[in-house]
Amino acid sequence: ESGCGKTTVGKGILQLVPVTSGNVIFQKQTLNRLSSKALRSARASMQIIFQDPFASMNPRMTINNVIKEGMLTSSIKDPALQEAKVDELLLRVGLRTDIKHRYPHEFSGGQRQRICIARALAAEPELIICDEPTSALDVSVQAQILNLLRDIQHEFGLSFLFITHNISVVDYLAHCVAVMYLGRIVEQGTRDEVLNNPKHPYTQALLAAVPRIHADENVVVAHQLDGELPSPANPPKGCHFHQRCPHAMPICLELYPDSTPLSPTHHVKCFLFEENYGSANTN
């Protein structure tokens, strides 16, 4: 849901917002404990693609300079090689090389997002955080960008942290899935485990809300959620979901559940699956 903290997690990983508790560990480095100089070096392996491509580009810079800016941390320092790299990246994301002397306002939303992908790749990263990169685009353009991202992932051996509301995007692109509610991950596992065998009542309700043309026997029929999302700044005591959960028990009002492993890769935070409270009540 909106406001659950997805974008904040992405920005927290890159240290674009301060992390007030916990640690961010990437490549055996605790990023939120690094000095400014060490963090600048570590960030060379990470990039982000923002939801609004136009707002993430300097309108006074040409596309050539926008992409070159991403090369400040790369191994390419020779100006001639940088020009060649810009041309290569533009072609890779499906754009002509002669557009590089134009400005961001001269492009459509889909073209701008392709430029932002090229800028992210210019830094030669190992991780790209994709913050709802298709939500502001037309449906036909969304499919093109998703296909491009998947091809790039295989070609460059990248990892994506893909933030999205769209379950069909998760099904198409993800390998592992984490479901967030009010700032916490309530269920995580492989794509098939979470989408085809959801266990947390919130995940079940989330998937049941996806419109379908034909009935699917594998879809768990979930109770429609009542009430509003509580304030993230003042979450309820106990399990944050208990005010909307059809299976809430007295323990849910007092304590937040620990993570319960359902398989080596599938974990859920719900008292319905803790041994002391039994799983007989689950679907």
Image (tube, rainbow, N blue to C red):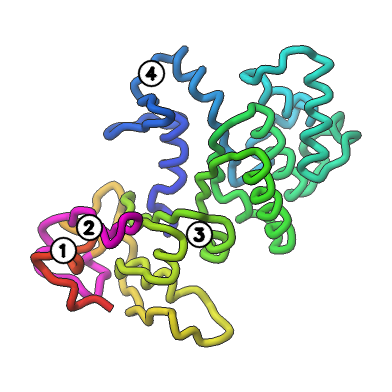
| Marks 3/1: CA–CA distance | 28 Å
Residue sitting nearer the eye, 268 or 256: 268
Q: Are marks 2 and 1 in contact (CB under 8 Å)?
A: yes
Q: Is there CB contact under 8 Å for labels 3 and 1?
A: no
Give the residue drawn at x 42%, y 59%: 1
Residue that carries the numbered disc 4 in the rendered image: 34
Residue shown at 56%/50% (left/top)? Answer: 132
Foreground mark, 4 or 1?
Answer: 1
N-term-proximal mark, 4 vs 1: 4
What type of secondary structure mainly makes up the magenta span?
A: loop
Q: Earlier in the sequence, mark 3 or mark 1?
A: 3
Q: Which residue is mark 2?
A: 260
Judging from the image, what secondary structure is the residue with disc 2 in?
strand
Q: CA distance from mark 2 to mark 1?
A: 7 Å
Q: Single out the residue that lies furthest toward the right.
A: 98
Q: Which numbered disc, 2 or 1, marks the residue that appears first in the sequence?
A: 2
Q: Earlier in the sequence, mark 2 or mark 3?
A: 3
Nearest to the observer: residue 265 or residue 182:
265
For residue 153, side relative to residue 13 (left or right): right
From the top left corner, tell me how far across and down residue 194 is, in percent.
40, 64
Against 222, is 171 above or below?
above
Q: Amino acid at mark 2?
A: Thr
Residue located beneath label 3 in the image: 165
Q: Mark 1 — residue?
A: 274
Q: Amino acid at mark 3?
A: His
